[in-house]
Image: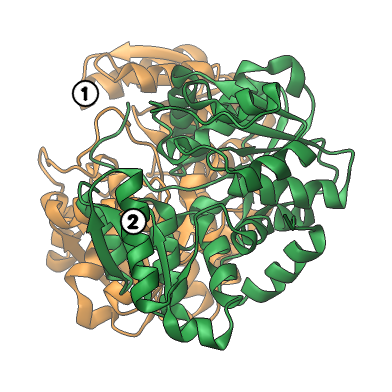
Chain colours: A orange, B green
């Protein structure tokens, strides 16, 4: 298994920089006072398609050979990765096939279709998704761009932390949310490559704590049918992301659904920015572990801002 | 009647700059495509207390004489100006008395109380507000800081446009919302002082179009019991702000409630920032007047981001 290095993440950044937004880092005096530390929010909710996923998808698309580009790309996702790959492919004149469960919300179908991708619907099971994807790959020769179990995707996701450490000096801790582990893998590789002394913490919902369980036991233990408001963090680690996270992440901390909701509302109210529940998880673990973060300079990756405004949790 | 000049606004800016946020100017490729022009959003929703009102209140407080400072300030408001004056006074060690209607929402009462201001409740009528304010002034000698009918407040509000024109070159048009006219007065004085060729447009809800009516007729015509979702724009112009607006504003354009709601949702969804309905009015008039704005470089003042997240219009 070839693992990414800081050099790979720097190369990814050079590759994607003409295509991605250089997102701002925001702070809030009020939130700093409430939580007793200085928090720097790297705002990937302002990234194209509203999520960090556009970084990984763009790096993967730009890393294809000419022969691969001609045959297109494929993925199965109903979330931010689907929109990210659709747009990244469209911006580079590459065909994208997106496998989505037939019960995906219309708003997500429309977003992906709006970027010009071809959508193939399937039954809402992992088996049907993978089978449909396999058939497309056989028929078209398209390259699979997995949402996180992919070297180039992980390198692209790591570029958010690369920018954050360039924007803010002397961080003590960097926190990112953990779902499938793509963002966490890229973030931890980047941060530890730059400075071994910066602690890297994963934020996970207590209700989908497979990374916490896996790190504690030393074995990959997927979550079974997790239920959490943080819908971007339902997926479990792969062997690839688990290996990277074991190498580089200091600790996984978990947060309750109540904390996640409360912190989402706090960010909306105090910072006037829209973040999705998965992003609020990074603040929720700070809230639940005040001693760990007290008086520290903490960089957090706000992963995205895609929420259904007609169906909010508050 | 002494009217403010660009010089006064520059002086206000020097005075308040250590206290206020220098807010960012954001753009959205998607919104530019939808509306056929290039829009620069001056984000006063990221200002302290979540609204431009903090600029005017701070300038008013800093312009007091030592004798006036010792006796404190007073205003009647249940909105952003109340919170703004409370915080501006607290930051300068000055006592603030805020007259609020007894039926003001708890969230607003708590915000003002949280900044350490003394709240006096009164019946929810203009007469009761003014009478209660008068009594406080007599008893304490406090200086009235009116939300918009005040020279120093208008000069402070104009500093948002001063920053905008410094941040973005070659604007064709500047748009600000019109309620009592404080922001519009400061904005138009500033913009025309810098460049007579930039058009200055006021954005008003059709349902509270007193500025439109007044400018058309040449006489001040207050709105009577207006109903609009843009709750920051319910107030009518004063003689003072009407005089300034007649001098400097090229045109008032109005927007329907439907447009305001739609544009508020568009800003939330596409830009991932929280803006209040009054702020969405500036985009709604662009939507309703596409020929006027086509291919222009348009600066808009996003006035604030204070909304009740548990009671959204969508």
Q: Residue at x 76, y 50 (%)?
A: B189
Q: Quadrant of the C terminus of chain B?
A: top left
Q: Position of residue B26 (x, y in %)?
A: 62, 46
User: In the rendered image, is residue B169 in sight?
Assistant: yes
Work out whether A235 lies above or below B226: below
Q: Residue at x 19, y 74 (%)?
A: A289
| Label 1 Cα crowd, 10 Å radius (few <14 / some 14-19 / many 20+) | few
Work out whether B250 lies above or below A125: below
Judge by depth and name the residue closer to the eye, B5 or A171: B5
Judge by depth and name the residue closer to the eye, B68 or A9: B68
User: In the rendered image, is residue B17 in sight?
Assistant: no
Badge 1 marks a residue whose secondary structure is helix
Residue B245 placement, left or right of B257: right
Q: Position of residue B78 (x, y in %)?
A: 34, 51
Q: Rounded to the nearest whole Å, what is the CA distance between mark 2 and mark 1?
A: 72 Å
Q: Nearer the viewer, mark 2 or mark 1?
A: 2
Badge 2 marks a residue whose secondary structure is helix
Q: Which mark is residue B3?
A: none
Residue A51 placement, left or right of A283: right
Q: Chain of mark 2?
A: B
Q: Chain of mark 1?
A: A
- Residue located beneath label 1 in the image: A127
Judge by depth and name the residue closer to the eye, A55 or B260: B260
Q: Position of residue B157 (x, y in %)?
A: 62, 56
- Residue located beneath label 2 in the image: B131
């Amino acid at each position: 298994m070839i693992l990414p290095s800081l050099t790979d993440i720097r190369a990814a950044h050079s590759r994607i920089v003409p295509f991605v937004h250089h997102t701002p880092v925001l702070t809030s005096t009020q939130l700093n006072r409430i939580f007793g530390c200085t928090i720097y929010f790297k705002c990937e909710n302002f990234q194209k398609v509203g999520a960090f996923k556009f970084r990984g998808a763009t790096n993967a698309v730009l890393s294809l050979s000419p022969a691969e580009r001609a045959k297109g790309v494929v993925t199965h996702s109903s979330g931010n990765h689907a929109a990210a790959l659709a747009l990244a492919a469209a911006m580079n004149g590459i065909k994208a096939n997106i496998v989505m469960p037939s019960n995906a919300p219309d708003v997500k179908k429309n977003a992906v279709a709006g970027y010009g991708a071809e959508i193939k619907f399937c039954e809402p099971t992992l088996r049907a998704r993978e089978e449909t994807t396999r058939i497309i790959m056989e028929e078209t020769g398209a390259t699979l761009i997995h949402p996180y179990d992919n070297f180039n995707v992980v390198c692209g996701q790591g570029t958010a932390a690369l920018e954050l450490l360039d924007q803010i000096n002397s961080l003590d801790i960097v926190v990112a949310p953990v779902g499938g582990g793509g963002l966490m893998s890229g973030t931890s590789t980047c941060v530890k490559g730059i400075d071994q002394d910066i602690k890297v913490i994963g934020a996970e919902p207590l209700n989908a704590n497979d990374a916490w369980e896996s790190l504690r036991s030393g074995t990959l233990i997927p979550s079974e049918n997790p239920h959490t408001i943080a819908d971007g963090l339902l997926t479990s680690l792969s062997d690839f992301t688990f290996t990277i996270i074991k190498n580089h992440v200091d600790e996984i901390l978990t947060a309750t659904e109540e904390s996640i909701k409360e912190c989402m509302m706090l960010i909306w109210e105090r910072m006037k920015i829209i973040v999705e529940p998965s992003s609020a998880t990074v603040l929720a673990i700070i809230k639940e572990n005040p001693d760990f973060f007290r008086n520290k300079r903490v960089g957090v990756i706000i992963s995205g801002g895609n929420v259904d405004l007609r169906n909010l949790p508050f």
